[in-house]
Amino acid sequence: MNTQTKAPASRFPRYRDLCPTGVGEAMQFASEWAGAAARLPGDPHAVQVAGGFAAQPLPPAPPFSFRLAGRPSAEILSGWRVTCTSGLAADGVTGQQVVWHDPQTGLECVLELQTFADFPAVEWVLRFRNTGMADTPLLEDIRPLDTQWAATGATQLRRSRGSPCTAADFEYLVTPLAAGETIKMAAGGGRSSNEWLPFFNLQTGNTGVVTAIGWSGQWAADFTRDTAGAIRLRAGQELTRLVLHPGEEIRTPRILLLFWSGEPQAGHNLLRRFVLAHHTPRPNGEILRGPLTLAHWGGMKTAGHLDRIEAYRRQNLGYEYYWVDAGWYGPPDSYSPDEFSGDWWKHVGNWTINPAAHPNGLRPISDAAAAAGMKFLLWFEPERAVTGTPLALEHPDWFLGERKPLGNLLLDLGNPDARRWLTDTISDFMTKQGVHLYRQDFNFDPLPYWRAADAPDRQGMTEIRHVEGLYTFWDELLRRHPGLVIDNCASGGRRIDLETISRSIPLWRSDWQCGWINEPTPGQSHTMGLSYWVPLSGTGVLGGCRRAGDTYNFRSSLSAAIQFAIFPYENFPIEEAYPWDWHRRMLADFQRARPLFYGDYYPLTPCGAALDTWAAYQMHRPDLGEGMVAAFRRAQSCFVVADLRLQGVEPDAEYELQDADSGRTWRQHGRELRERGVRLTMEAAPESRLVFYRKV
């Protein structure tokens, strides 16, 4: 599935006429940059661009680097034969291919480049292939991004942490980059957003460039400013030191550069629009709608699931997916009524349905869900198998890792036989059991497994083949099942990057939400931090039924998708006294808010998890003239009143605002909303407010 060239559905437009000031110049810059990248190395011409980017001379050297037999690519590419081809424009995307061919070794370096008619962006993947008759010399330190940016003013790097299950997950940071300094980051353990999100916004004065990496493995990036003011941007797979055998080809991380001018938030919103237009799944040709899901433990017996589905049907809640999580698999003696008991965890990798829990398979559950108006979501963790499970015994050559009791093994997706088995098994299972949303988890770090499997002259190869195999696996599932939605989970949101969000949505962006008694307010900062970069994500309402009636808790998890667990385990009996009316009100608020997450994002307060502050953010759809404000007075805040100045609204327009709790409506002019703000009062702490607005 080529998610980079598909046009968005009409109800979520590309905002062609809504770009911020300066984007016209930036679009010219991107176009000229792409042309510079395709010219022969050594061409002395350097492009100068008028307008907001006049200070950005474009060096003619390719935007990548590597070393071959110890020699840097900058020295050797001038002696290679170069061919350039341009593809036809499709859906506003124009492709170019530049091939450098080494006549001595047969090594080819292929730059697959894309530019966009309605976005100031350039995107590429770098490939290497051996067309010779012998192994190549040692190819190492491949950086698909290695270029320069001129510092035209004060320089700051804007970035967000990853999701290692803390209150500070996705924390948004602004770090000055002074002359002579370097900022370095890496994925962490081989999961792409374990330590840092692979999205960065480099600001120099009133211009900047957003860099995004598409690599679901161990990437690394660094930003270095020299004493003359030039900034070097480098990114790629952290470790590459390998030879290519005859006929072999590898790909490198996908790189995106998106250019902006004005305010940094304009750059972030331009990225959001670009991601929605070119890196968002489109099941059945329609842009993905963030799922509204209802979660349950997979080890709960079929009868328990059927009872709950019937209870939800009677209440007419309007959920879209019935979620069955881990524990549904394994032998009869592994039956585990909840995740806190039994030995379900020992049987990960055994994808046979547990006959003690589900004697007739899972189809009775998916059929009942369908009759109640819900599709079926099911959890898998196919890349991990516990030592001693059947497949690991039958095909030991398909797995990486030390065979020790209850140890984790990694299914090698670079093994074609293993990947073919996995694709057929998951695809057939989904068809037979009625699965519409495939939830793929990944609960351990693969990097030690990859590196232990590499020979000294093949370092990085196992990782490359695994990552390539993951994309091939997902693409084939999406091809076979056109309406399929993939949930990308990796102990929460530890695998979020440009490639995964093109094929999936992270419905469980942080394992912080697993706890029953955790403070809910970090959910607010998780939404705020991730929204700078990724429009569509989801999370669970902390505590589920244990916090029924807690509006502050529910709204703390508000995002483009949401999961709720009312009666998730067998020992959580169905309670008719549950506050169903409150629950329906919360779902109505979510349904009203969901389309607004497809618009621009404005943080109205700093993004952090401190308990003595307010947190507030705005989602704004300029194409609809609508938006919302979510505001939270946290538990230890002493402030009762706040004036929140809105952004994006038209100064000369009038807006009608509505408080979601009281239903009260009032009108304010856009200029007043921008300059004075909307005044919110919260007498209690913690407390929340949700305000919707529309242009009249």
Image: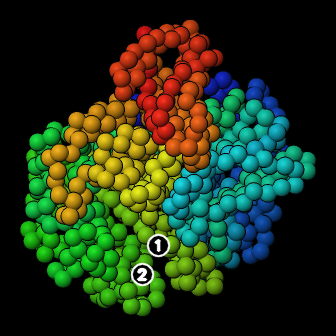
| Residue 110 screen position, x and y as percent | 60, 58
User: The disc labelled 2 sits on which kind of residue?
Assistant: Asn
Taking the spot 67% from the left edge, 60% from the top edge, the residue there is 185
In the rendered view, would you say 64 is above or below 657? Answer: below
Question: Mark 1 and mark 2 in contact (Cβ < 8 Å)?
Answer: yes
The C terminus, quarter of image: top left
In the rendered view, would you say 420 is above or below 134? Answer: above
| Residue 273 screen position, x and y as percent | 51, 35
Which residue in the structure is indicated by mark 2?
408
Location of residue 679 (image quadrant): top right
Taking the spot 73% from the left edge, 69% from the top edge, the residue there is 67
Q: Secondary structure at mark 1?
A: loop
Q: Is residue 425 left or right of residue 656?
A: left
Q: Do we see residue 141 in this rendering?
A: yes
Looking at the picture, tell me which residue is in the foreground, 592 or 686.
Answer: 686
In the rendered view, would you say 679 is above or below 187? Answer: above
Which residue in the structure is indicated by mark 1?
444
Q: Secondary structure at mark 2?
A: strand
